[in-house]
Image (tube, helix red, strand yellow):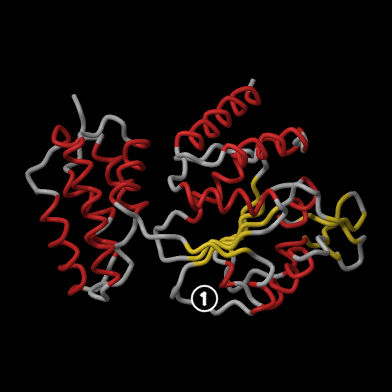
Amino acid sequence: MKSDLIKGDIMEELEFLKEQGVSGQLIREVEKFRKSFEVSEEVKSRIVKPPIPFYGKDILEMSIAGLLQGENLLLAGPKATGKNILAENLAFIFNRPVYNVSFHVNTDSGDLIGTDTFVDNQVKLRKGSIYQCAQYGGFGILDEINMAKNDAVSVLHATLDYRRCIDVPGYDKIDLHPAARFIGTMNYGYAGTRELNEALVSRFLVIDMPQQTEESLAFIFRQMFPDVKESAEKQFAGVFLDLQLKAANGEISTRSLDLRGLIAAVKIIKTGLSPFKAVTMGVINKTFDTFEKEIVEDVVRTRIPEEWTRDDVYEQ
């Protein structure tokens, strides 16, 4: 039953690609890909419908074309440009199980490949996320890949290039399932990030993610909040665009440029909390510098009046 629901959701996603004007040839090739590679019952639960579809014809066409030809993608760009949403949508469009790896300073090869563990009086390999992705033909989402340390990156080299294999020390070499793909994401300028070396970058096709626009934000709000009034939707989108401009001009940091926080704020307004208080929690309070917080608060006040109530945001 769940499998039938997922198939229906994927067909809706493909229809959405057609509505955006994505090449019919690419959509037909995606359908062939999905028919060619069945998903093991063990991992069907990892096929997850994203909260919203990704909006952006050109980006979708470039991504789909690369993945169809067996390439890996690196989604690079500033904060809140939809990198993870795109990665999740691509996995869903191709009907593949998702394996998420969030890189940080302590991520090492054992986290990716696996580690020895003692089971039934035997030493066995507890498979890591990259191993499982390779085995089951998943889409591996390598989040914040520019935070990976050398030990972790070394594992990825043979996995991501023409060899498409993983050498597991003490165990057999495993070849990647033909449907396996990897999608890396990276933000600029976060603490702990660094430049990716040429050897790693050469293993990806790189897509530079554009900033949000009024059109893309309107799409996101319509998808997530169909009962929000159009006048309120424009003001919430305006808050984000105003902050995005100030961050681009160096007037504020990107701390308050938080689309997730803004979406969460719109959600909790439904409970009856005042819109201004909700945006204070979701956006204004994301920065801890007093001077910057005043700037962000001024931006919000010009868009979201303190006297607004739930009825100013949601249809009755």
Secondary structure under badge 1? loop
Tell me if 166 is positioned left or right of 245 in this view.
right
Please report the residue visible at 21 percent of the width from the left and 72 percent of the height from the top.
292
Give the residue pinned by disc 1: 193
Q: Position of residue 265 (x, y in %)?
A: 28, 46
Residue 297 vertical position relative to residue 56 in the rendered view, above or below: below
Q: Where the C terminus falls, by quadrant? A: top left
Q: Quadrant of residue 72?
A: bottom right
Q: Please report the residue visible at 81 percent of the width from the left and 49 percent of the height from the top.
A: 177
Q: Is residue 18 above or below residue 135?
A: above
Relative horizontal placement of residue 141, taking residue 293 as reference (left or right): right
Three-letter code, disc 1: Thr
> Residue 24, image x and y in percent?
58, 37
**Nearest the camera: 155 or 200?**
200
Residue lying at the far left of the rendered structure: 307
Task: State whether residue 62 is above or below residue 205.
Answer: above
Is residue 40 or residue 87 the one in the foreground? 87
| Residue 204 x, y percent position in the rendering | 65, 65
Q: In this orientation, which residue lies closer to the viewer: 311 or 236?
A: 236
Quadrant where the N terminus is found in the figure: top right
Q: Residue at x 18, y 40 (%)?
A: 232
